[in-house]
Image (cartoon, helix red, strand yellow):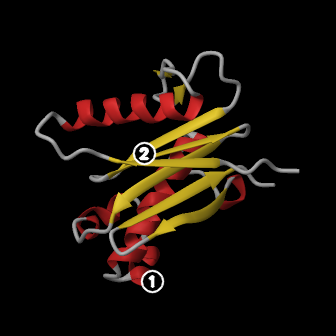
Amino acid sequence: MTAVPRFYTASLDQSVEKRREREQRAEAELLAEIFGHPVELLHEESGRPYIPGYDGFISISHSRNTLLIALSPEPLGVDIEQVQDRVLRVREKFLSPDEITALGDDVRAVTRAWCAFEAVFKLTGDLHAKPADFCLTTILDTSDEVAVLATLPR
């Protein structure tokens, strides 16, 4: 039986502090809430986050307004993004010409594709992972944000 990841979100304070400081503070607060006490969040050389003593997997993503943390006993990757036109300016970096033609100027679809690309990279560490290497699930799709979960095939 495959384990179901648990997802946690928090709104990011839009105060004047630097974005990365705001994200780190929100991560620490949400992780303390999840685990019932403060935990140390470290990163492997690859950038993948982990918590010493926690035997599961963690994936973290931030949009402008939201922090998303996913926990699972199995490897996973998540990404959350705001739906914005600017994704159309960089789509050549993560979509093939055929994919660009198929998605056109559909900002939501291109944003979902970007989230999928990022989530798969967080899962596999491979910029060229093949579809047989992962499964994708859209876990959030609102007017403002999209989030995608990547897991290993079942």
Query: Image point 41% across, 28% down: which residue?
Result: 28
Query: Image point 58% across, 29% down: which residue?
Result: 35
Q: How many marks?
A: 2
Query: Image point 53% across, 22% down: which residue?
Result: 37
- Residue 106 in percent (x, y) is at 35, 81
- What's the amino acid at mark 2? Ser
Q: Is residue 31 above or below residue 108?
A: above
Between the C-alphas of marks 2 and 1, the distance is 27 Å
- What's the amino acid at mark 1? Ala
Q: Is residue 10 above or below residue 20?
A: below
Q: Nearer the viewer, residue 132 or 122?
A: 122
Instruction: Report the disc number at residue 102.
Output: 1
Question: In the image, is 84 to the left or to the right of 153?
Answer: left
Instruction: Report the disc number at residue 52.
Output: none
- Residue 7 in percent (x, y) is at 57, 49
Q: Quadrant of residue 96?
A: bottom left
Question: In the image, is 151 to the left or to the right of 111?
Answer: right
Instruction: Report the disc number at residue 61.
Output: 2
Instruction: Give the mark toward the camera: 2 or 1.
Output: 2
Q: Nearer the viewer, residue 136 or 4?
A: 4
- Residue 87 in percent (x, y) is at 28, 65
Q: Residues within 10 Å of mark 2 (few under 14, many from 20)?
A: many
- Report helix, strand or loop for mark 2: strand
Q: Residues within 10 Å of mark 1 (few under 14, many from 20)?
A: few
Question: In the image, is 103 to the left or to the right of 59?
Answer: left
Q: Quadrant of residue 111?
A: bottom left
The mark that comes first in sequence, 2 or 1, is: 2
Q: Can residue 95 be seen at all in this image of the molecule?
A: no
Q: In the rendered image, which quarter contains the C terminus?
A: bottom right
- Report helix, strand or loop for mark 1: helix
